[in-house]
Structures are given as C-alpha cells and as structure tokens.
Image: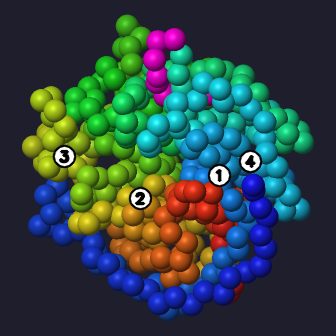
Amino acid sequence: MRSSLAGPLALTLLLTACGGGSDEDAGSVATPPTTEAPAGAPSLQVEVVAGGFDHPWDVAQAEDGTLLLDERAGGFTAVRPDGTVQEVEADLGDLFATGETGLMGLVLDPAFAENRRFYTCQGVTDGDGASIEVIAWTVADDWSTATRVDDPLIGGIPVNEGSGRHGGCRVEFGPDGALLVGTGDNAVGTYPQDLGVLGGKVLRADPATGEPLPDNPFVAPDDGAEDLIWTYGHRNVQGLAVRPGTDQTYSVEHGPDRNDEVNLLQPGGNYGWDPGAGGYDESVPMTDPEIEGAVPAVWDSGAPPIAPSDGTFLEGDQWGDYDGLLLLGALRGQHVLALRLDEQGQLVEQFRLPELDGTYGRIRTVEQGTDGALYVTTDNGDDRDQLLRVTPQG
C-alpha cells in the first residue's frame, strides 16, 4: 500500500569521511580525499513524500509538479501536487524482472506538457526469450493510465537471462535533444569492446523514431548495432547526467570490488572496460591503461566501491554553495556523494551530504525536479522504500 507522508525531518548528522581513489589503485585516477561539506553550505530539509515502495528505480517531475515513479518489479505511481498518491495503470505483462533487471530508467519527453510522452528502459520477454528495450508511452491527463505508443522504440539490447546481472539501464535527454541510453554488459566479457553488441554502451537515438542519429560516431552503411553506439567500453551504466548550460554529459558506472567511475562522455570514446574473451575477469582495471586511447575517468571510488546508481546536477541560487554540484546516489555506500567539478569537468573536491549520510539506507536515484527540489528514491526492498524531497534551508 502506497502512503503519503508529511513533515520535515530535522537531521544534524556529522559527516563521516571516506577514502577516495589513489594513484596506487590499478586503473584509477588521482582523486581528492573526501572532506566535510563547505562551512557555508545550506542545511537541508528532508521530507518523506511517499512510502511503501519496493525498489523504486527512477523518478521524474512534470511541469505541473506531478512526480512519476517506477518500481523494478513493475508498476508506475504518480504523486500529485496535492500529495495524492495514485497508481498509474499500465500493461507490464511482458516485463522481465530478474535480479538487477526489471522496470528501470524513466524520463519525460522535453515536450511532455504538449505530448504527454515518456520513455522507459526495461526487461521484456517474448517468444524468442528476453531482452532489454526502450519503450515510449503516453500518460492520461489525469495520470490514471499509461499507454505504449512505440513498443519498442529501441530493441535488441541484450539481457542476462539467467541472473539479470548488469542490465543497466538509464535513459536521459542529451543537451542536443537526443535520447541517451546507458546499458550494462550483462557480465559477458566480450560485450563492452564489441561494437556489434548494444551491451556495455551508451546509445544515442532520435526520440521520435528510435533510429540512430546520422552524426553518431559509428554509423555505417549496413545498419548494424554500431549505428546506435555513442560510447563503449562500459561495465554497467547506472546514471546519466547533463551539466546545465554546457554540452557535457557524464555517465555513472559500477565497478567490480573497486573503482566505480564517473566519466565525461566523448563521441566514440572507449572507456576501457575489457574483462576478456575467455570469461569475465573482474580483476582487470575499470579503465585498462593497455587499451590505446582509453578515456580516463573524471572520478573513481578507489576501494571499496560505493555502487553509485544515478547522478544529477544541482542548479539554482537557492542551493548556495551546493549550486553546480554533481550528486551521486550510493547503494552500497548508503549516502549521497557531492562532486565539485571545474569547467573542464575535472574533479575539485568531494564530500557527502550530511543529512543523507547513512540515514535512509541504500540510495538509488537522485534527480532535481522542475520545482528546483532534489528528489531521492531509496532501494531497501520489502515495501520499505521511500520517495524523499530535499530542499535547502538557507
């Protein structure tokens, strides 16, 4: 049963520092140590908007203030501006929900107010087995039902049918209006470096048709999988974040037992994950220096990993010293990590948001809403998960 909860939670937790990556970690970048939040940073008010969810995966806010949320095992929920929590009926009868895969990334169309269109990335089953697809939907004006309109918009993304491991899958709109899709490598060693497979990649497509854009870096006459590929050499892309006012897009990626990464995406870039053709060797570096031209990460976690699962930039004068930060939700770390980047995308400092440090368990998604607030979903399971609203208090 979904519930609507109100009331700010006054939180004054002390920051617990954690070690960043170091030059001694194989394949890592030199990462500044984790520090405390800036002395002039605003305190944060955290409110529970709704609860009773089971592994909510993504959330997006429409211009009317309504929040649309999905859950990995299936189901959409709308939270209306007056606090009403309602189920959005939708056909999810073909959902493949196993392990890490299910109903995952969700994003509203930039013209949502006019076309009511949104997109999901989800596991599906059919007569030929299972795969991952991007599906386009429209939602009723009263948020009562969602209807598939392009099914699939993008198909052919592989899935690990046995375990659901490393299914990705985040969807986001790039600065130029292209639809970006971050995928996982299915724990198959050859996928990240194989331009004939859509796993372990970031894809770029026309959101109206699902077709590759003509300026994609690997477009070829034979219309193969490589036409959709924007970047490759990824392990498990769990987040995509566009830096406001720039053409910069960052991916957030799970490492094995070390070296989670944030990467500044470059068209055609190889991000260096290559666990091998003879199996799945997770002892290799996340960004293998033996791969010529491998693009180094902007940030990595070092060891142990924090399992970052999403990223969003904060924007707005109301955030004070937090304005411009890239925030990462951390599953294993159970916190929200803030990264301050310079104009070129190089890391300047990192720190945890004190009010969200170890208080709510695993953090799946962080997303700034159209109202300027930060929305956060937890990932603890057993109908214990919550949708949080975080606002600065001066």
Under circle 1, the secondary element is: strand
The reply to whether the C-beta atoms of the residues labelled 2 and 3 are less than 8 Å apart is no
Q: Which residue is mark 2?
A: 308
CA distance for labels 4 and 1: 9 Å
Q: Which residue is mark 3?
A: 282
Q: Residues within 10 Å of mark 4 (few under 14, many from 20)?
A: many
The residue under the point 33% across, 35% down is 185
**Position in image of residue 106 (x %, y %):** 61, 42
Q: Amino acid at mark 3?
A: Glu
CA distance for labels 1 and 3: 31 Å
Q: Say above or below: 186 vs 294.
A: above
Residues shaded magenta: 127-136
- Counting residues from the start of the chain, the first of labels 1 and 3 encountered is 1
Query: In this image, 32 relative to 339: left or right?
Result: left
Query: Which of labels 4 and 2 is toward the front?
Result: 4
Q: Which residue is mark 1?
A: 59
